[in-house]
Structures are given as structure tokens and as C-alpha cells.
Image: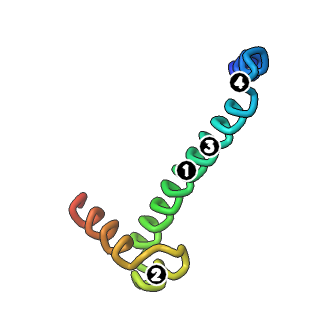
Amino acid sequence: MSTSEVLVEIACKEGSRDAFSEAYRRGFREGFKAGLIRATEKIVRNLIKQTILTDEQIALAFEVTTDYVAEIRRQLSQAH
């Protein structure tokens, strides 16, 4: 039995299935959001390195601010 299955079983026995389900959904959403943020940053970094697009074009394509792109560009320049 997996850890999540054990937790569901315990939650059901204790009558807190709704609370557990909500906590599980919230954790999933937060994890998904964190992964999306990391993926977006990685893509922006790669596009900056390719020097194909301007900061404005990158920001528009990935729905981030030009300040966000500029900050990543600054971090990359300091790393080199």
C-alpha cells in the first residue's frame, strides 16, 4: 500500500476525508505552480542564452514581466 493510500485510509477512518482531500488538492496545486515557475525560468534563461529574442518578446511569449526577464539576464551575466 502506498503512502498516499495509507493517508487516505486513516483520514476516512477519522472522518476527515474532506479536510484531507482539500489539503491534498492544495498541495498538488502548490507543487504544480512551483514546477511551472521553475520551468518558465529555465525556458527564459535558455532563450536569453540563444539571443534570438528581445526581453520584451520573451516576456510577451511567456506572460512574465520585462523586469523578470531582465533580472534573469542580470543573474546570467554575473554567473559568467
Locate residue 26 relative to residue 49 in the image: left or right: right
Query: Would you name the residue on which mark 2 appears?
Result: 52
Query: Would you name the residue on which mark 1 appears?
Result: 35
Q: Does 20 appear above or below 40?
A: above
Q: Does 69 appear above or below 21?
A: below
Sequence order check, earlier mark of 3 and 4: 4
Q: How is the image coloured?
A: rainbow
The answer for how far apart the CA atoms under marks 1 and 4 are is: 20 Å
Identity of the residue drawn at 37% across and 70% down: 68
Q: Are marks 2 and 4 in contact (CB under 8 Å)?
A: no
Secondary-structure class at tag 1 = helix
Secondary-structure class at tag 4 = helix
Q: Nearer the viewer, mark 3 or mark 2?
A: 3
**Residue 1 in sight in this render:** no
Secondary-structure class at tag 3 = helix
Label 4, residues with CA under 10 Å away: few <14, some 14-19, many ≥20: few
The answer for how far apart the CA atoms under marks 3 and 2 are is: 38 Å
Q: Nearer the viewer, mark 1 or mark 3?
A: 3
Q: Nearer the viewer, mark 1 or mark 4?
A: 4
Amino acid type, mark 1: Gly
